[in-house]
Image (cartoon, grey):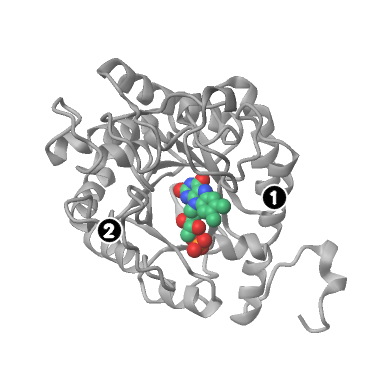
Amino acid sequence: MSALFTPFSLRSLTLPNRIGIPPMCQYSATDGRAGDWHLQHYASRAVGGAGLVIVEASAVLPEGRISPGDLGLWDEAQVAPLARIAAAIADQGAVPAIQLAHAGRKASVGRGWEAQRTLTAAEGGWTAVAPSALAFTGYDTPQELDAAAIAGVVAAFVAAAERARRAGFQAVEIHAAHGYLLHQFLSPLSNRRDDDYGGSFANRVRLTREVVAAVRAVWPSELPLLIRLSATDWLDGGWDAEQTVALCRLLRDDGVDLVDVSTGGLDPAAKIPAAPGFQVPFAARIRRETGLPVAAVGLITEAAQAEALVAGGEADLVLVGREILRNPYWPLQAAQALGVAAAWPAQYLRALPPGT
Ligand code: FNR
């Protein structure tokens, strides 16, 4: 009996197993629209057997893209190409989810494999916005958002969630991690505001809570709402595990169904002790202290490792990122390794050794 291959329910949904694919930017969109790359990439990973596929960071506003190649959900023309992807994922029995994002001061840089510096207007760049006019190391200084623009960000998350639903996604994940806009508001290192959105803990978490509440109000009550948090900045005086737990208690009441627990991203000066499963203790603590379901992520690459952390009650879901970029069939192979009947597609059965 495998814990990793036990179904998991969130609101009305049942995931067939506890393996998810975390959002991973492909930097291959045109004007925020998905193309053939995205369709084959997500469809082939869904064929690999994950129970949940979270489509990459999709910007709620054009200036909220990390790079000119990011997906978007700020425009109706972006819905139809994403609908093909949501359908292809669901067709394989996985739950199609999508991450809604705003990059804030980390916007307007090259695609993931290009130079990570602010693009000029001639290169297709734009002026980034942020809680405060404080630059991410090596990038240009962003423009501080005023109250009206903050309200516009909340409205943009709502409109993007409505488009995600029309595209057929069954879950949305709010991106409040990795040093992007919502995380910039959370961390005292990037938020120096003296209005209702800065200073105290209650003020720094205000925008994230407003986004969650506003999205929850339009997202169908039978479908789950996820959030990704960086549980620590790994920096003195920054956002940390204590504050993350306190925020999660509030988010539980605001209607969040699962916390996807990552870390870091606010400042490249952070010393991150990356090692197998290094972020799992943060997920386990949030689960233990708030009762909220959690997903663990980060250097989880072995079937036995994933099985142990679900069986041990450290996480409800395991997200496997780069390993599934390398090997889309990781979930099916993990099932075989754990002695569970793997649901290989009928089209591939003749490729398997006898007795598989
Ligand atoms: C990422 N990651 C990421 N995170 C996120 O919240 N939204 C995103 O769109 C992306 N994009 C992205 C692209 C690529 C190419 C990589 C490799 C990573 C982070 C990712 O979701 C995950 O948290 C990390 O990769 C750690 O998990 P693994 O890869 O160690 O399993």
Residue 320 image offset from top left, x and y in percent: 53, 63
Q: Is residue 1 visible?
A: no
- Give 295 or 129, whichever is nearer the viewer: 129
Q: 278 above or below 83? A: below
Asked which secondary structure carries label 1, the reply is: helix
Q: Which residue is outermost to the right? A: 350
Residue 59 image offset from top left, x and y in percent: 50, 32
- Estimate the spatial distance between the alpha carbons at disc 2 and disc 1, rounded to whole Å: 32 Å
Report the residue marked by disc 1. Answer: 41
- Give 252 or 232, whichever is nearer the viewer: 232
Which residue corresponds to the image point at 82% horizontal and 81% vertical from the top-left?
353
Report whether 226 appears left or right of 132.
right
Q: How many marks?
A: 2
Which quarter of the picture shows residue 275? bottom left
Q: 330 above or below 169? A: below
Badge 2 vs badge 1, beta-carbon distance below 8 Å = no
Report whether 109 appears left or right of 231.
right
Crowdedness of circle 2 by 10 Å Cα count: few (<14), some, many (20+)?
Answer: many
Which residue corresponds to the image point at 81% horizontal and 76% vertical from the top-left?
352
What label does residue 259 carry, if any?
none
Mark closest to the chain's N terminus, 2 or 1: 1
What label does residue 234 carry, if any?
2
Report whether 258 appears left or right of 184.
right
Which residue corresponds to the image point at 45% horizontal and 34% vertical from the top-left?
107
Q: Which residue is outermost to the top? A: 148
Q: Is residue 303 visible?
A: yes
Looking at the rendered structure, the kind of residue marked 2 is Trp
Crowdedness of circle 1 by 10 Å Cα count: few (<14), some, many (20+)?
Answer: some
Looking at the rendered structure, the kind of residue marked 1 is His
Which residue corresponds to the image point at 57% horizontal and 61% vertical from the top-left?
322
Nearer the observer: mark 2 or 1; the answer is 2
Residue 83 image offset from top left, x and y in percent: 66, 34
